[in-house]
Amino acid sequence: MIAQLRFLTVIGIISLAGACSTQHALNTPVGPGPLGQTQSTANGFLTVYSLMKTYPIDEETWYRVHTDYGVYDANGQRVMSVRNAASYHDPIPKTVELPAGNYTIQGWGDGYALYKVPVVIQAGRVTTVNLEANTHQLFQGAKASDMVRAYDGIIVGWEAK
């Protein structure tokens, strides 16, 4: 009986560890939406709606922020690490400025899955990446053929054109 209990405990731990370390690499690049604002600058902008984590301030007060993520160039070298909030208590993801080009972002999404998403940054435009299941309103009215979806159907962003 004890041997069976130990075996089931080990199987449970292995299953939990596997679930927590899921990684999803997307192939289709995410780019700016067709109707986004344009600014006159050589750089573009990136906003990532990553996993929201909840932190306590005291026994009755909590705050939620988006988790951090990394930005990598075409050679896999880290370009920047993004602390994904303007302040410690800011629930809105930070928008960062990047030179126009192709990058990959790596960050946590819903279900504690690690995502690797190719992104295209265009001059003066904002590329939005969504790794949260509950932020579908970012893409209301979009045609399904214009969207990049994750393995579970979550809309990750506009397909780069």
Image (cartoon, helix red, strand yellow):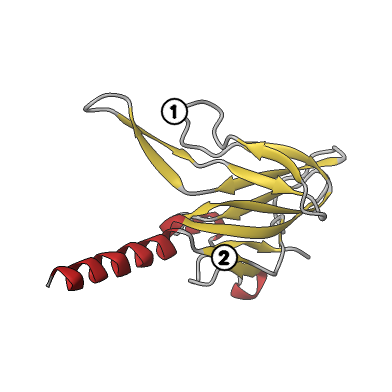
The C terminus appears in which quarter of the rendering?
Answer: bottom right
Residue appearing at x 78%, y 41% in the figure: 98
- Percent across and percent down for residue 46 are 68, 45
Cα distance between the residues tagged 1 and 2: 28 Å
- Percent across and percent down for residue 131 are 53, 56
The kind of residue on which mark 1 rests is His
Residue appearing at x 32%, y 25% in the figure: 57
Residue appearing at x 74%, y 37% in the figure: 97
- Percent across and percent down for residue 64 are 40, 37
Q: Which residue is mark 2?
A: 24
Q: Do callouts 1 and 2 mark residues in contact (Cβ within 8 Å)?
A: no
Q: Look at the numbered disc 1 and give the secondary structure of its residue.
A: loop
In the image shown, does 35 or 56 lie closer to the viewer?
Answer: 56
The residue most toward the front is: 3
- Residue 47: image quadrant is top right
**Discs 1/2, front:** 2
Q: Which residue is mark 1?
A: 89
Label for residue 100? Answer: none
